[in-house]
Image (tube, helix red, strand yellow):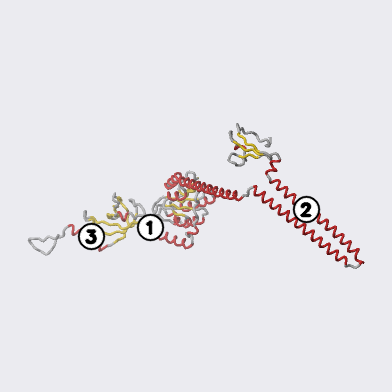
């Protein structure tokens, strides 16, 4: 608070330190607002609380800076000493020490603005050409037999991918197509590696991977030639470049984008445990389908068995059919005979009224017709008797008694069922044995399997 000088009682007021510090803070904030500053990071430290403390300097001066946890969490790179950055900050005073301090709202790497504009222009142009259209993306194979990796042999991402593939799908073969992933010549090497993989055609899917880094470090993956090579590649390609917050042109041109190299490996390699579980589930479904089919077919067989006629009914039906045929044949023969007799009588009446000169001719024709009629009648009668004999023979063949007359016999079990298989006979079993003229009941003693007398030697 301002203090009056008691002796002089002048109107001039004295400032307290705290009030002056706050007044300076307000003045700086009103005067400068949010400023953009470019400089080199020095003495960078991330506290346990998540706040970041560092100094921003150039050749002539340095300013203390603080970036609170909420803002630091949004950074897409890890600041380090000696790195050129561009910050947007509020100018203020750190009152406890009276130091001038910049409270940082955002930070990006110096020069990133020009690269970002170049990135956006290329992305917009390639997108207008249709290189990023979803309908042109190729699907990933569900169960790849071989996976290709396009990356540097010294890249840490390669070891992460190999470890993930070994853990999830050790049965999958891995082929590495080495290429630089950073520097001026990296983009042409990546294009050559893609073309080599497509030419050799030894893998089912390709992984284009690299670990995280600054935008300059990832710039080879923003190359136009690489984007066109990815679009033209006949193999499906998964891009796993940088971290989750990193985006490159290769991510849009590839068929699938993964947030990290490890995630790219997980997308292409199904877990072996999951495959075993799927196989087990498919086996169970197949078993259930087979059991269902067996049950359905057994029911159909039972229905067909019920529809089969009994042998006795078959014989009875055949006998009735034969009697019907006999009756129809006799009736037909009677009608034919009556028709012929009527025809003869009519011809005889006609002959009686014919002139004498035609009598001999008409009689000769009548005799010829009578002879042809007798021959046709005999042939029809022979055919009818042949059909009748065939039907009688079929009935005789179907008659079980006729079978027994030829020396066979039938055996019935104790429950009245017909014995169809001698292997069903057991010691001590009772059987009923029947021939054509007689039947006996017998109790069996010892039953021993024997070779069938009719089997081939």
What x and y, as percent, mark residue 5?
Answer: 10, 60
Of tags 3 and 2, which is closer to the observer?
2
* Mark found first going from the N terminus, 2 or 1: 1
Gap between marks 2 and 1, in whole Å? 111 Å
From the viewer's side, name the closer residue of 454 and 150. 454
* Mark found first going from the N terminus, 3 or 1: 3
From the viewer's side, name the closer residue of 28 and 123. 123
Q: Residue furthest top?
A: 446
Gap between marks 3 and 1, in whole Å? 31 Å
How many discs appear? 3
| Tag 3–tag 1 contact (CB < 8 Å) | no
Crowd tier of the residue under label 3, counting other residues whose Cα lies within 10 Å: few below 14, some 14–19, many 20 or above: some
Crowd tier of the residue under label 1, counting other residues whose Cα lies within 10 Å: few below 14, some 14–19, many 20 or above: some
Residue designated by label 1: 112
Q: Which residue sits at x=41%, y=56%?
A: 247
Residue designated by label 3: 25
């Amino acid at each position: 608070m301002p203090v009056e000088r008691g002796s002089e009682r002048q109107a001039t007021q004295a400032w307290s330190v705290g009030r002056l510090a706050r007044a300076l803070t307000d003045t700086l904030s009103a005067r400068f607002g949010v400023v953009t500053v470019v400089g080199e990071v020095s003495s960078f430290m991330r506290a346990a609380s998540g706040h970041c403390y560092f100094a921003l300097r150039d050749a002539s001066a340095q300013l203390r800076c603080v970036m609170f946890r909420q803002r630091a969490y949004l950074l897409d790179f890890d600041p380090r000493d000696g790195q050129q950055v561009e910050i947007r900050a509020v100018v203020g005073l750190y009152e406890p020490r009276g130091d001038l301090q910049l409270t940082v709202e955002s930070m990006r790497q110096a020069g990133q603005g020009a690269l970002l504009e170049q990135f956006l222009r290329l992305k917009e142009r390639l997108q207008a050409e249709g290189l990023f259209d979803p309908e042109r993306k190729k699907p990933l194979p569900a169960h790849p037999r071989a996976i290709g990796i396009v990356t540097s042999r010294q890249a840490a991402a390669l070891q992460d991918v190999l470890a993930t593939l070994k853990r999830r799908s050790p049965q999958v073969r891995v082929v590495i197509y080495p290429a630089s992933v950073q520097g001026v010549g990296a983009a042409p090497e990546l294009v050559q590696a893609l073309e080599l993989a497509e030419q050799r055609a030894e893998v089912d899917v390709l992984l284009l991977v690299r670990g995280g880094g600054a935008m300059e470090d990832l710039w080879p993956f923003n190359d136009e030639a690489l984007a066109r090579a990815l679009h033209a590649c006949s193999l499906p390609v998964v891009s796993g470049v940088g971290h989750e917050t990193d985006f490159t042109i290769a991510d849009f041109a590839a068929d699938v984008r993964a947030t990290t190299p490890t995630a790219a490996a997980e997308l292409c390699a199904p877990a072996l445990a999951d495959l075993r579980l799927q196989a087990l589930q498919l086996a169970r479904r197949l078993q259930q389908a087979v059991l269902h089919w067996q049950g359905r077919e057994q029911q159909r067989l039972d229905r067909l068995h019920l529809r089969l006629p009994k042998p006795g009914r078959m014989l009875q039906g055949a006998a009735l059919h034969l009697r019907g045929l006999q009756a129809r044949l006799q009736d037909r023969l009677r009608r034919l005979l009556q028709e012929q007799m009527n025809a003869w009588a009519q011809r005889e009446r006609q002959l009686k009224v014919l002139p004498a000169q035609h009598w001999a001719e008409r009689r000769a024709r009548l005799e010829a017709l009578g002879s042809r009629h007798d021959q046709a009648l005999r042939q029809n009668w022979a055919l009818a008797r042949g059909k009748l004999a065939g039907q009688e023979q079929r009935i005789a063949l179907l008659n079980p008694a006729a079978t027994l007359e030829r020396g066979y016999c039938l055996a019935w079990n104790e429950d009245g069922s017909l014995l169809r298989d001698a292997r069903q006979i057991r010691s001590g079993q009772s059987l009923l044995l029947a021939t054509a003229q007689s039947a006996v009941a017998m109790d069996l003693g010892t039953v021993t399997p024997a070779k069938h007398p009719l089997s081939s030697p």
